[in-house]
Image (cartoon, coloured by chain):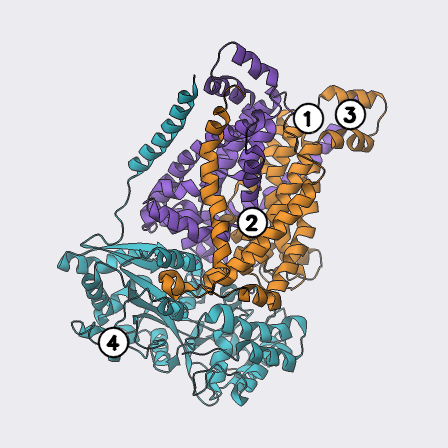
Amino acid sequence: MRIVSSRRLTAAIGAALGAGALVTAFPFLWMISGSVKPRSESAAYPPRLLPEAPTFENFAQLFGRLDFGRYLVNTLVVVLISMAGVVLMAMAGYGFAKFRFRGRGPMFFLVLATMMVPVQVTMIPTYLLLNGMRLTNTLVGVAIPGLVSGFGVFLFRQFMSAVPTEMIEAARLDGAGEARIFWRIVLPLSRPILAVQIVLTFIGAWNSFLWPLIVADDDRLYTLSVGVSLLNRQIATSPSLQMAGATLMVVPILIVFIVFQRHIVQGFTLSGLR
Amino acid sequence: MKQPLAPYAFIAPAMILLLVFGVLPILVALPVSLTDMNLAGLADWSRIEFAGVANFRELVADDAFWQALTNTGIFALLGVPTVIAVSFAAALLLHRSENRFFRALRAFYFAPAITAIVAVSLVWGYLLNTRFGLVNHLLSTVGLPPARWLGDPVLVKFSVALVAVWRGTGLNIIIFLAALKTIPREYLEAAELDGASGARKIVSIVIPLLRFAFLFVAVTTVIAWLQFFDEPFVLTKGGPLGESTSISLFLYQEGFSAGRFGYAAAGTLVLFLIIAGVTLVQLRGRRFDADR
Amino acid sequence: MRRPGLALAALLLAACSLVLAACSGTAPAGGTPGELTVWIMGDSSARFEQLVRPFVDRTGIRVDPVPVPWDSVDQKFTTAVASGDGPDALQIGLSKLRTFADSGALLTLDDRTLREHPGLAAANFLDGVSPGGDPVSVPWVADTRVLFYRRDILTGQGLDEPPRTWDEVRAYARILAGRGGGGYGFHIPQWDSALPVIMTWTMGGRIVDDAGRVDFDTPEFHRAADLYLGFHADRSVPADPDFDQIQGFVSGATPMLVSGPYLAGEVASAAPELDGKWSVAPIPGDATHTSLLAGSNLGVWRSSGNRDAALRLLDYLSQPRTQLTWYELDGQLPTAKAALNDPELTADPLVSVYARQLRDARPLPPVPNWDGETGKALLDALNSVVLTGANRDTALQGLYAATGGTSVN
């Protein structure tokens, strides 16, 4: 009896969640449908959900008139470089979580403080620094300001605090070096948070707009975000073209996410962390 | 303690990057805030003059600054509780089952968080348009009058916050779900056998066990909303009548559009201190213990 | 011990990143001899490349256009000024000209600099704008505002001729709004700070006094403000700040509006079936028919190592022939007088209206940061009456106070 009612409840919750998911996802459906609408339909009122005469002309324009192919490649490279940051953040998180050392408190406070610094203020000093380091106009320069975030270090430290200290001590007694302990014991145990961080880093790098725009002297280094904003003309804009650009940005990341999601879920299930 | 250098080796790379790209800029802002630096001064440093606390004085007297500060406060009051409540509720419901359907649903709830504001703002702009938007069209089909979602000085705050909530919950759902996974199902099942009702179960078992997740989500969400920028910037440019201008947007406009870097730096320091103050209050007495 | 291992890992990571960066290819920086980096606003850079191809072929100077989003030009420009490294030449929206000129980052285009380039002489162009002293830019593309009207809808209400004075516009708008069905008569975009200024000009007034100070406390501006607010009082214009111009015009909700040539292109592509049912007319006016001169100029970066090449490019771009080609490619109107008189251009009835209007058009006053300060204060004052029912006189007093100290010098 109890099981039946519990099942019923689950079904009810599922239905509610399904309805919620539709609402949440609706802007995406609208965007995708808008991206295949010809220009004449995009201004139609009342708005129609589905295009009458779907067309891929908008996408053709993006790749033809604008260099969206190149922007796509650049975006992928920035994503790849950014993955190095995940490892750096994991290392720092481990350092803060499992060692006691001089200056740990103040340094961790600095990590937290970086989360509170408004981005706008960092723009000019960071640009001057990158310029001084001759990193402007490189994809490294595009990726490096966002490589490490206080948020990420914080998250890693919190989760790694729960890695049993006994396991680390035991490994040390067995003569394992610190690097080995980190790679072989701590990182594998941190798989769930690692998965979360990889996804977060992917999202951040994929959507990066500010640094590609500022650091690049050349549109050879622009990313998709910058490309989409190029479509914003001062006054007039073509909604269909914009929707196509937006679709191009959103759909690949959705696919990556859906593929990766299973791994994240697995990571969660494997974890014994709290 | 056996290897005193190891911890430094672990934290050094990340620390250096954070110091250079996170801490240094705010240190630079301090001296800049005491000058009249503008675009010309930026090009030629000899044209910068020391201004003392004039920037701060002007800030206090600037109605636009107070309007932006008030707006930010309203945004945070609207957004933070909503984001936390919605993400927790969604996570709790999604946690209900492990079956395929529920797992697939997760992607829908996470999706808004992974999309760039540049892209989604366009969509929301069209959906919320007063005259030609889909939302008002749907309202009209059930006989309701159109609302000026992005055009009414009061309503605009809710609309902009709505888009930010839509985009802001996904990440927190992930965090709550991760935390929920750590509660052994036996706890909950045992409570069920004891006859604990759903609501009581949540209040007495789940929430205390998720203390840390809640604190973490609260701290990061508050910071995010105090730095609120993207949605008003792309959806309304701060309008109408400055009613959706957040403090970050105000500083951006003063700094980059007006080229008043000294003034913007002063405002940035004020914002930084506000954020730091609020965060410290949240953390007080609830230490993030490293070795539990 | 194993610490070196850790360091090695970090090194490896760094190396990987560098290799990746190397693979992706570092583009040549601006200032490469023989190659000009040119900032082009918006998404026109591919067409710009096409435009300059003959120049490249003839001179051997390569041109690398870099598209810059309109929304982000401030960030891009500011960081370039901070580092001193900019493009060789750049497009400058007129509303940004004063800010850019004040930065000192642009090359002064005095007579001596332009001696070798007679094509760049100011007399060749529409009256441009040169804030504070020597010019730092030359006109490039022109934009103006004219009256767009839906002939089919106006005729349907017995209005056979487009309105010529603001009183007529207002009367027409009332009639058109009387059609019912959610229709309006006219559209006042609440983000357009130029419209109230145009209204003031056409009342015979000015925004800037003889001393170069912004002054809104004039009888002509008062009449312009009453006109602006009068449309709203009549309820013949939509009061939504996010009302869409194109959809409004195409759907017929707002059969008259004041806009630029870009709108014609957008309407033509969004609603080809309306072809022939709409047209444009000069800006209505009581005392004058003066409209807005907007558009973009071109400037040369002061520290550019390719100054001469950049000036040669500007010279090429200012040729009437080049500007006509640019109109064909990108739909942006020329600034060279000779090009504007070219029959190739004026054969198109719409364009002949634009070209005529451009001869009676003025730029916005070159105050620092018009969009962010003076223009915003102007719009906020008027729209606060519209949106929140604020008192007209209080709102205008606030406007005088906010803009009183602003000067074009």
For disc 4, the marked residue is C342
Image quadrant where residue B144 sits: bottom right
Are marks 4 and 3 in one subunit? no
Answer yes or no: do the residues labelled 2 and 1 have beta carbons within 8 Å? no
Image quadrant where residue C3 sits: top left
For disc 1, the marked residue is B97
Are marks 4 and 2 in one subunit? no
Give the drawing colour for chain C: cyan
Mark 2 and mark 3 lie on one chain; the one further toward the N terminus is 3
Chain under numbered label 1? B
Residue most toward the right?
Answer: B195
Question: Alpha-carbon neighbours of circle 4 within 10 Å: few (<14), some, or many (≥20)?
Answer: some
Locate the C terminus of chain C and report the quarter of the image it occupies. bottom left
The residues tagged by marks 1 and 4 sit, at their Cα atoms, a distance apart of 73 Å
Element carrying mark 2: loop
Residue B141 visible (yes or no): yes
Q: Nearer the viewer, mark 4 or mark 2?
A: 4
Are marks 2 and 1 in one subunit? no
Element carrying mark 3: helix
Question: For the residue marked with disc 3, what is the amino acid?
Answer: Ser
The residues tagged by marks 2 and 1 sit, at their Cα atoms, a distance apart of 32 Å
Residue A6 shows which numbered tag? Answer: 3
Give the drawing colour for chain B: orange
For disc 2, the marked residue is A49
